[in-house]
Amino acid sequence: MAISSYNALQVNGSLQSRLISHSFNHLKTSLSSTVKPFFKELQQLLPMKVDVSKTMKNTSGKMLDAVVDSLFQFVDIPSLPSQKNFLPVEEIGELVEVTCTLGEIPADFAEGVFIRNGSNPLFGGLKSAVSIFGESHNIWVEGEGMLHALYFKKDDDCGSWIISYKNRYVESETFKIETQRNKPGFLPALVGDAPAIIAAYLLNSLRFGTVNKHMSNTNVFEHSGRIYSIAENYLPQEVDISTLETICDWDVNGTWDRPFTSHPKKAPNGELVVMGTDAWKPFYVLGVISADGKKVHKVDLKFKRCVLSHDIGVTQNYNVILDYPLTLDVKRLTMGGQILQYEKEEYARIGVMPRYGDAESVKWFEVQTNCTFHILNCFEDANQVIVRGCRALTSVLSDPDGSLNPYEWFSKGFIFAGDHDSAEVGYLFTHLYEWRLNMLSGKVEERNLTGSEYSMDFPFINEQFTGLKHKYGYTPVIDSGASSICMAKFGSLAKLYLEESDSTKSVEGRGEHLIKVEYHKFEDNNFCSGSAFVPRNGGIEEDDGWIITFVHNEETDVTQVHIIDAQDFEGEAIAKLTLPQRVPYGFHSTFLSMPACQS
C-alpha cells in the first residue's frame, strides 16, 4: 500500500481546519456509538458488588481498542534493499562468546563493557497508521530501544581475554504494553496528516496514558555507579549491565517529572547536567543532579517555544544551552501544519548559564540560524566560552515543509555539492563548527573547522576531558553516496586535531585555515555506528587509547567490532571481532570500565 502522508496536504489553512473539524466529528460519532453500550453494560453490573472503577477502565479500554481496530490500519513502511541493516533483529538470548577474528586485544586494554543503543522496532519494522483522518507514520528514530553489549574480561589464570556478546530490548512500560498485546497499539503521533496526528494524540492518551512510546533507544550513560538507557521523550531506565535487564525508571527520587535529554553531561566535579524539553510549558527545564544522584537543582529557563534540543554542554563553571528553530508546536498542528518543523527563518542562540544559575542569569548569544544536534565539547578560555559541535543548515529529522518523501529528502540532502549552503541540495551536510562566545563583550566569533569535503556527525572525545580544554575529537564521517540512496551511513572515522591547522585547506573567502583531520576508512560497503574512545590504563596523553566501533559489512551481512589505535589512526584496526549476528545501525555508545560496571 502506498504511504499517502509522505506528501503534505496541498490545501489552504482554512480548508485544513475544516478537514480537521470534519474528521473529529466523525471520531466523536464513532466513540459515541460505543459509549452507549458501555454505559448499558455498566448499569447491569452496578447491582453486583464489583469494583466499578476497574470495570469502567477495562471496558472503556476495550471500547477504545475497538474504535482503533475499526478505524485504523497499521501498515509496514516499505524499505529499500540498501536499508536492510536498519531493520530489526531478535534478542540472542544468553551471552555468546566472541573470538578475535583479526589481530589481538592489547594487554593493557580496559576490562569493561562496550554498549550501544539503537532503534529496533517491534513487529518487524516501523509502521504507518491509515484511517479516515489520513495517515501518520513512524520516522527512523522511533523504534524500541535495543542494547548491544560486548563484554571484555581477563582470565585471572592465564591473562587471556574472554569476550562475549549479548543484546536485549529496553523494557519500558510502553514496550511491555505492546508486547503483552502482541500487536502494534500506539498510533504514530509525530509525522503525518494533521487530523491523523491529533487523533493519535487523543487515542494514545486515552488508551495508554501517554501520547508516545517510551523508546529509550538513543544513548547509554553512567551516573553514581548506575547505568541508564535514555531517549529524550521520557525518563531514563536503569539497566543491570551484567544482564541488560531493565530495572526501573529513574526520576531522581521523585524530583524529576518530565522528559530527560539523551545527552546528559557529567561536569568536571561529578555533577550531571541535564535538561528536558516538552511541547507544553515549561518548554525547557535545566537540571543539575548531585554527584550521588539523589537530588536535583531545577530551573525553568522560560523559553517562548518548544525546541527539540538534543544536547547540552558543560564547562568548569557553566552550562551551555542550544536554542535552535526545530520546534514542536501543538497550535501549528491544530491549524493543519506539522507538529515538528524546522523553521529556517527563525532565530538561533546559545546560552551560557552559571552552574546553579536561574533563567535571568543566562547570557544569550545570537548566532547564525542552524540545527546542531550534537556538541563535541565546551570549555572556558580566558573570557571566552568555546562551543564546538556538528552544525547543519536544517534538521535531519524532517523535511521542513513536508513536501518531499523521506527518500527524496535524504537523497537531495546528502548529494555532494561544492556549495553546501545551497537550499536545494546538501542541506544535511554537517560540519564541525566552532562558536567563541565572549562573556565580557557579548560578541560571537563562529567558523567552520572542517570545510565541505566531508559531512560529520555523532562526535565524541576522551570523556576525561568533558568540559575542559582539549586537543582532539573524533567523529564518524558520512558516506554521501551511500547515504543519498536512503539514510545516513558512516563509511569512515575522523580524528580532529583541534589545535593544528591544515595549511593546504582554508575557508573559502575568509583566508582561515581548516583544522588538521586524519581519516580511518573502512572497506567498501562497510559502515560504522556507535563509536567510543577507550583510554589506555595509565595513559598520559589525551589520545593515548583506542577507538572502538561496530562495523557492518553490507556485502556479507556480517557485523564486527573494530578496535583502532587512536595514535595510529590511519593504520589498520589492531583487532576485529566478528559478532554472532547482525547488529543494525544505531545511535550512541559508551565504554564502561570495570569499576563502573561493578558499582
Image: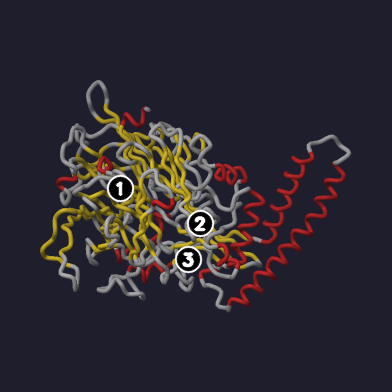
Amino acid on which disc 1 is placed: Ser
* Dot 2 crowding, Cα within 10 Å, few <14, some 14–19, many 20+: many
Q: Which residue in the protein does label 1 denote?
A: 531
* Quadrant where the N terminus is found in the figure: bottom right
Residue at the top extreme? 157
Residue at the left extreme? 503
2 or 3: tag closer to the N-terminus: 2
Q: Which residue in the protein does label 3 denote?
A: 341
Mark 2 or 3, which is nearer the eye?
3
Element type where label 1 sits in the image: strand
The quarter holding residue 533 reads: top left
Q: Is residue 208 above or below residue 501?
A: above
Amino acid on which disc 3 is placed: Gln
Q: Which residue in the protein does label 2 denote?
A: 126
Q: Is residue 485 visible?
A: yes
Residues at badges 2 and 3 in contact (C-beta under 8 Å)? no
Amino acid on which disc 2 is placed: Leu
